[in-house]
Image (cartoon, rainbow, N blue to C red):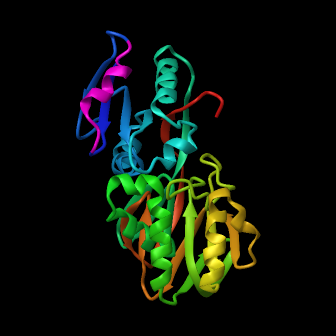
Amino acid sequence: MKVAALLGPSVKTAAIRRFQIHPDIQITPVEQLTADWDAALIFGGDGTVHRYLPQLHAFKIPVLVVPSGSGNDFAHTLGIHNSSIALQVWKGFCAGQTNVRKIDLGLIRKDKEETLFCCVAGAGLDAQANARANRMPTWLRGAGGYLVAALQTLIKLEPLEIHLNCECGCEKCPGLFVAIGNASRYGHGFKVAPKAALDDGKLDICLVRRMNKMKVLCCLPTIYFGAHLRLREVSYFQAPSARLDTRPRLELYADGEYICDTPVEISVAPGALKVISPKYL
């Protein structure tokens, strides 16, 4: 079996050795994928997964994510919380277990460009915090840096207006941020879309309207548990697609990466990715 190893920027090739469990399995570090690989191993975080989504989707290569980055929300959503769990899942796959499943991806359209994402796309407070966190040292990003960045961003946050249009209706209101999730979590564990499922053919949309900054400070930690849905300033709905615009124009981030500025159209791509995951999922 030919296996491509895709390494994140801080991962050494030595990480591959544990997964070389049989002489007939040839694992090779590569920079790009082609159609002739039987499987892929990603040693990295959400940003590394995001980078290879177009190739994984195009070639229909089953992929196992070994959480090794500063942000590993996608791997955690799949039930892979560390490299030991990833190794057990890999052993099952190599032994012929049926632990490959198809999951949805999100698709962002801006002008004539299309970008796939696996976790959450967002604009507003969360995206600005994301941008700030990306400038932090890697060790800090993995140790609550996103929360620190969100608090710093809140202090300087300017008023904004969010226009959201989907099959559930239209929303036009002063807001803090909007998050559109394929998965339930981002930002190192913030469960912004707690009802999201990776294979339901829908996006989960969380719109947070404007509230005073003191209330935001009190409520921000509730997102870790998905308890923010109880707030009257939060609207939450599911739809296969949505159009997002803002005043002023805002940066849109997805999987921790800058994608484009608003306005954008976002939709779900059903069954777009094959993942190797624990059998119980």
The answer to whether residue 30 shows anywhere in this view is: yes
Task: Give whichever of 240, 72 is nearer the camera.
Answer: 72
Q: Which quadrant holds the N terminus?
A: top left
Q: Which quadrant holds the C terminus?
A: top right
Q: Measuring from the top left, give residue 4's x and y in whole percent.
A: 31, 30
In the rendered structure, the answer to whether residue 180 lies left or right of residue 129 reads right
In the rendered structure, the answer to whether residue 127 lies left or right of residue 213 reads left
Q: Measuring from the top left, give residue 103's x and y in whole percent.
A: 55, 43
Magenta stretch holds residue 20 = yes
Up the image or down, 233 lies above or below 191; here it is below
Extreme-top residue of the structure: 23
Q: Measuring from the top left, give residue 75's x and y in whole percent.
A: 50, 42
Residue interval drawn in magenta: 10-21
Instruction: Look at 57% across and 60% down and name the residue there.
Output: 181
Instruction: Look at 52% across and 57% down and name the residue there.
Output: 186
Task: Give whichever of 148, 82 is nearer the camera.
Answer: 148
Task: Give whichever of 153, 59 is nearer the camera.
Answer: 153
The answer to whether residue 168 shows anywhere in this view is: no
In the rendered structure, the answer to whether residue 77 lies left or right of residue 274 reads right
Up the image or down, 235 lies above or below 239; here it is below
Q: How many marks?
A: 0
Up the image or down, 231 lies above or below 87; here it is below
Instruction: Look at 61% across and 69% down and name the residue there.
Output: 220
